Image: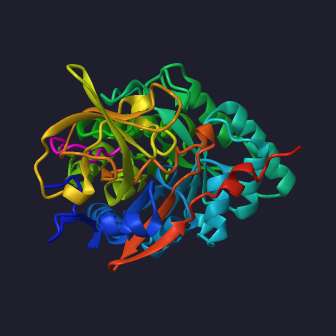
Amino acid sequence: MFVSDCLNVNELGHLTIGGRDTVELAQTFGTPVYVMDEQQIRKSCESYRESINKYYGGQGLVAYASKAFCCKAICKMIDEEGLGLDVVSIGELYTAQSVNFPPEKIFFHGNNKTVQELLAALEYEVGHIVVDNLTELEILNQLAISQNKKANIMFRIKPGIDAHTHDFVRTGQIDSKFGLALETGEAMQAVKAAVGMSHINLKGLHCHIGSQIFDIEPFQHAAQVMLGFMAEIKAQTGLELSELNLGGGFGIKYLPEHDPVEYDRYMMLVSQTVKTTCQEKGLKTPFIIIEPGRSIVGPAGITLYTVGSVKEIPGIRTYVSVDGGMGDNPRYILYQSEYEALIANKAGQPKTRTVTIAGKCCESGDLLGENMPIQEVAPGDILAVLATGAYNYSMSSNYNRISKPAVVMIKDQQARTVVKRETLEDIVRNDLL
């Protein structure tokens, strides 16, 4: 019925998440508010963890891509579930450190890491620094020398895969700001340079082909390309790399018609490709890392808003304005990302209206979606946008000096705030006269 398993309708006809009435949650915590179901998050973690152990015989690790949603509570939860952590900034690394996340299970990504970030990674002794380019490699080696440490690294490689997704979230093709290209010889040049560096320990390769991918074939193709390159490295340098990070990008169900691949089927088919290709190339099967983010937290979250006005323009469209918008979810204006929405206090009723959901920002493009089917709607109704657990809080802003919403977590039908709602004082906290 819904895009997420944690959603339902109660006897009052209200939408529930994790067994809690969303109308009551809106009244208690105010709107806009992000609400997430902890059980759903942990269930996804468990599914990935069991699947990778099953198909790689314990020689694999799931690392949560924290850019999807990062706060202290989620980092602690990911650690409790036995997963690793993918961070892309000193802020995400600091958040992980604040809850004593095991540094050996952290992967530090980014296409333009600063000296400050590289030093922080060395100081915290993160397990892997995923090096993006030759400049970064040279800087890291010099920093490691100065700190008398040896940096464990992977190289981010562009495997040249078209993942059939939005241009802005395709990251595996040659024309991308991320990683080293195979076609130009740049990647092999970096490998040979790293092999000769005294304070660099090259452990493996990483790739990421894009986001919100529903097909398995691009992942299989990427594995073949990466293993082929690992075989070339072995032939040219004598070094057989021991680790392969295949990234993330697994699609989720934003709309009822979306049909994402089950995690277990993905793991089974890609593992078969990995093992077959290794046999063909004369390689030992490497330790495999994957980095899901959206698929762990996306389906577990919703955003609740209060409807302010309903503006009908006859023969054109109906605008339903809510007390949030592009500040708490910029994905529609960035990617035209589609979501399912409904009136939470009328969730048991049929969807009879088609509307455009407008935010409150002073910006004509501030929309959460167009031509969206919802129930009959009136001012004061609670509107829920589903599957917003990923890249909503993470990408939120203070445009128009609007405060960021709170994040509320549901566990065993109990609700707790894991990120406080910003206050007006928070808005001016860093201002100087």
Report the magenta stretch's main SS: loop
Tell me where residue 377 appears, x and y as whole percent: 24, 45
Q: Position of residue 379 (x, y in %)?
A: 32, 47
Residue occupying image coordinates x 46% and y 66%: 29
Quadrant in the picture for residue 368: top left
Q: Nearer the viewer, residue 3 or 66?
A: 3
Question: Where does the magenta region start and end?
Answer: 249-258
Q: Is residue 300 visible?
A: yes
Check residue 5 for magenta coloring: no
Viewport quadrant of the C terminus? top right
Give x and y (percent) for residue 154. Answer: 57, 46
Coordinates of residue 273 in the picture (x, y in percent): 26, 45
Determine the residue positioned at 53% across, 34% down.
236
Total marks placed: 0
Quadrant in which the N terminus appears: bottom left
Give the colour scheme of this rendering.
rainbow
Q: Residue furthest right?
A: 433
Q: Which residue is at the front of the view, 190 or 162?
A: 162
Q: Is residue 60 at all visible to an observer of this figure? A: no
The residue that appears at 44% across and 57% down in the rendered structure is 31
Q: Nearer the viewer, residue 232 or 21?
A: 21
